[in-house]
Image: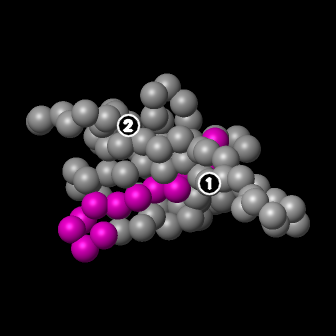
Amino acid sequence: MIRLPGQVDAVILVVTTIVDKYGDQTTTTVEHPVVGRFAPERSVEYMAGQASSPGNVTPAQLFVSDATFTPNANDQVRVMGKEWTVEGDPQVWPSGKYVLNLKRFGT
């Protein structure tokens, strides 16, 4: 696979929990390695002259183009050694590429 500048290795962790008829839970995690581009969280400042509009933080995002599946909001992502939780449903493009909004794991 040809790696483009700025691409990073990531692992999407698909976590599935099944409850059997006795109420016992079995959790499995399947790792799917992907290559994509990572955009970290960043602060967006309020507009000048509008002191009442607070700044906010845009979520981190992972742009993936080589997916063989589409992750969902229950999944987790490991990018550059840090754990993230997928926030909401991914934005899927007609070409099969998608964008994941990420939130720091455990926050």
Indicate left or right for 99 with 104 as reference. left
Residue 58 image point, x, y percent: 62, 54
Above-or-below relation of 98 to 39: below
Residue 29 image point, x, y percent: 46, 43
Indicate left or right for 20 with 4 as reference. right
Residue 88 seen in the current view: yes
Is disc 2 surrounded by few (<14), some (14 to 19) or many (20+) residues within 10 Å? many
Proximity of marks 1 and 2: CB atoms separated by less than 8 Å:
no
> Would residue 38 be counted in the magenta stretch?
no
Which of the 4 image quarters holds residue 33?
A: top left
| Amino acid at pointer 1 | Thr
Residue 10 circle label? 2
Residue 24 image point, x, y percent: 63, 53
Boundaries of the magenta span: 93-104
Of 3 and 13, which appears nearest the observer? 3
Above-or-below relation of 26 to 97: above
| Amino acid at pointer 2 | Ala
Residue 75 seen in the current view: no
Helix, strand or loop status at disc 2: strand
Of 66 and 58, which appears nearest the observer? 58
Which of the 4 image quarters holds residue 12?
A: top left
Which of the 4 image quarters holds residue 107?
A: top right
> Would residue 103 be counted in the magenta stretch?
yes
Between disc 1 and disc 2, whose residue precedes?
Answer: 2
Residue 58 circle label? 1
Q: Which colour scheme is used?
A: one colour
